[in-house]
Amino acid sequence: MSKDNPTLIESSTFPRHVIAEIQRAAKTGIYDIRGFGAKRDIPTFDDLVFLGASTSRYPLEGYREKCTTEVVLGNRFAKNPIHLKTPVTIAGMSFGSLSAQAKESLGRGATLAGTSTTTGDGGMTPEERGHSKTLVYQYLPSRYGMNPDDLRRADAIEIVLGQGAKPGGGGMLLGQKISPRVAEMRNLPEGIDQRSACRHPDWTGPDDLEIKIQELREITNWEKPIYVKVGATRVFYDVTLAVKAGADVVVVDGMQGGTAATQDVFIEHVGIPTLPAVRMAVEALQEMDMHRKVQLIVSGGIRSGADVAKALALGADAVSIGTAALIALGDQSPEFDDEYKAIGSAAGFWDDYQAGNDPAGITTQDPELAKRLDPILGGRRLANYINVLTLELQTLARACGKSHVHNLEPEDMVALTMEAAAMAGVPLAGTSWIPGKNGM
Amino acid sequence: MTAINLNESSVRELNEKLQSGSSGDQFSVNNTVGKHALSVGLTSEINVEINGHVGYYCAGMNQQANIVINGNAGPGLAENMMSGEVRVTGNASQYAAATAHGGLLVIEGDASSRCGISMKGVNIVVGGNIGHMSAFMAQSGCLVVCGDAGDALGDSVYEAKIYVRGEVKSLGTDCIEKEMRDEHKKELKELLKQSNMNHKVEDFRRYGSARKLYNFDIDQVDEY
Amino acid sequence: MCGIVGLFIKNPALESELGALVAPMLSEMTERGPDSAGMAVYRDPNDKGCKVTVLSQKLDFDWASFEKAVNSHFSLNKFTVTQNHAVLSLDNSLSEVEHWLASNWTDLSVTSAGTNIEIFKGKGNPADFIKQFDIKNMTGTHALGHTRMATESAITTEHSHPFSTGQDLCLVHNGSLSNHNRLRETLKRAGVQFKTDNDSEVAAGYLSWRLSEGDDLDEALNHAIEDLDGFYTFAIGTKDGFAVMRDPIGCKPAIMAETDDWAAMSSEYRAIATLPGAENARIWEPEPTQIYSWKRS
């Protein structure tokens, strides 16, 4: 019902934003492209809660009684596994989709917090390598900027099959963000709309992937951990195949995972939520007896230390943050609300990363806007945020009696809804029922 | 000359030796039996002679080295090569010189499908024919084909230049025949000379991007 | 995802070495397919009657009693047990035998039927398969082998390739079909039976359905190009030879080679490299949608 005219009823099938989208499509003849991740309401980690200490389980004291958060990633085959102080890492985001200042902020912040950052679809910038103590280098279908020198400078290599926002889709960067520097890095004409491949150019299938991984190891002297990243779809099979193909680490990105640009229909209607994705990935690893031997990083809508704790409790070794990291840097900040309004949006709603006119200076190549982000301040803010996530994680782990965050287990949680119980494989609170597993 | 026998040495040992070679060193590699990832990630101007057929990704990410394969090559030959020269006397399987940024790849026989896919500056000269979807999303560099080209040549091509002497079975989206001007003839002549291909520039035609897909236009929607 | 191999002996003097030649080929494909292996061998023809290979999921199956039962109902001229398989050579009509097996021996599944073909399916590492089934000592005219890396269905013996598509016919597949679920339902309605949820079994079922509708092999394969969606390299075994075909996109690898003594195909050259005379063989890659075949004259 409308506030102004109480007799008006809005349709659930055709609410105003759907009407607006149909009208926009009719006007322009092009699909809606936007950034950010899936916005619609889906089961998330919010629907799980921890069973804290009780008469039978004892919590740990803060400070004296340690709750360690260190994580080692990639010790299956690589000579130099990655050592992190916290299980929170920064997900792959490209220079091109983000400004140089934003990439620098991420590097500085991650380094302060003792964790890794990841390059994106444009390749590695010298600033990024310079500012990031631990840098994961993405190996994508586009291969923009790919070269052996950067492979050797990287600390780990992440072969990307897909991402949660668009499993099966390739990278996208529109003309307004193909600045001279971006164009040069990607070997494209300036100002054009980048078209990207959705499959890797020189291998198809896990049988070929195995050979590709061998090649990358040969080029980098078997030193670097090889990650394989997939958008969450057929997670059980994908994780199994990644392990069989020789991955050291598997990264699974749920549908809430963000993107800088893709079709809205892709974001909202392809891929599954992070909640079931974690459980299925862990099941696959356990079935092959590879849990903790091949590490699992999950991403897609990680927001607080509670999300981190729940992901770890379900069996992940670490998580990645993307959208949350940008918000920590200043994305969606209320201080830009007037400017967001001037470009048709509002603080908290902004998702036109593809447009390149970001008032926060993060998802833009416009030098005037990008200047607004002070990388040192941005780095500090990100480090603060990661530290909060880590402290929150420890608080919850201690409350469950764990001296290492990896000792969190699914049995430490119950679900508040049936969907979450079924997806996470955790009983509905107050019952011992896991829909689909026991009973029915 | 250092001879490496793959019956006795592992692929790891081979690559380690080659990757630590110095400019001017000569190597020969024998008993290849279709093994993968041979002679990858080289970084200096060494000369490698590979005797036998090789598997996937031979000469992958090559920098500066001169590599000759006396035999056939599997998929992904010289993928992502940065510089240097790779020559194969036989045929090459799919994805030859995929995403390569520089250097010269010469295939004396035929290349399979997706030759030069997503190429980013490499020059490729093929003495025989090439398969379908070659030069798919080719961004820059030159692909010279002395024989025929298969279906969908240059589909979604950016700025790469394609020269074909024989027949083109069909052109890909946004790829059209273009005028051969003096600068193109000069470039082609130089490539043919470098690769020892004895053909006349006049026998070739040039293909490249129509540039209609550079910015989305609703009237081009059928191309997608 | 997988590795496939096929070997067709042209020079009769080499028939006694079929197994010795194809075993190393299969072994080279282990990394592509570590989960399970299978092989179809064409040998010891029974032109007067039929040959059936059966498989028992139970390792302690009472083959002696089974042999006795077969003997009492049919004219059994040879009965050979290997691991959990038995090859029966009978001087009876195939339909009688198949009907009797289906009605009385539901614990056994028929892996192949015809006059020449024998299909063995293993679970686990290909090296074990080669050893357990003594592949190296097999003789015959041609063989197709497969090593499997399971993608979307389980790892069981029944899921291993080759899949039999009809008398003396079999299929090995490298790739992944994207419309096999609906196609399976359509084929079921047409009377085709399936034992697994495997996409390759659907391809095999499709071909045998087309053949039963009156297509010859070439026509069936051409229909397959229209009706099957996805990525595939197929190698098909027939009584007299074998055929190879790739899908229109042609991304899954395939390589073929031929000398005066043999014709071979594989997913990777290194399998072919094990054959005598490989260095001087004519080597080429099959063009998408083109059917390549060899037949004994």
Image (tube, rainbow, N blue to C red):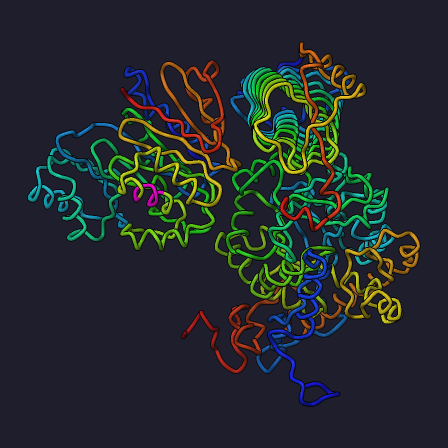
In the displayed structure, A126 sits above or below A165; it is above
User: What residue lies at 72% left-to-right and 25% top-to-bottom?
Assistant: B142
- Res B109 → quadrant: top right
**Does residue C207 show up magenta in the picture?**
yes
Can the viewer see residue C261 in this picture? yes
**Side of A50 relative to C191 (left or right):** right
Q: Position of residue A376 (x, y in %)?
A: 91, 57
**Side of A70 relative to A55 (left or right):** right
- Res A352 → quadrant: bottom right
Q: Position of residue C41 (x, y in %)?
A: 29, 31
Residue A98 or A48: which is nearer the viewer?
A98
Residue C65 or A107: which is nearer the viewer?
A107
Q: Position of residue C175 (x, y in %)?
A: 47, 41
**Side of B145 relative to A357 (left or right):** left
* Viewport quadrant of the C terminus of chain C: top left
Magenta part of the chain: C204-209
**Side of B77 relative to C238 (left or right):** right
Residue A344 or C45: which is nearer the viewer?
A344
Can the viewer see residue B6 in this picture? no
Q: Position of residue A355 (x, y in %)?
A: 80, 56
**Does residue B62 show up magenta in the picture?**
no
Residue A24 or C94: which is nearer the viewer?
A24
Q: Main secondary structure of the magenta part?
A: helix
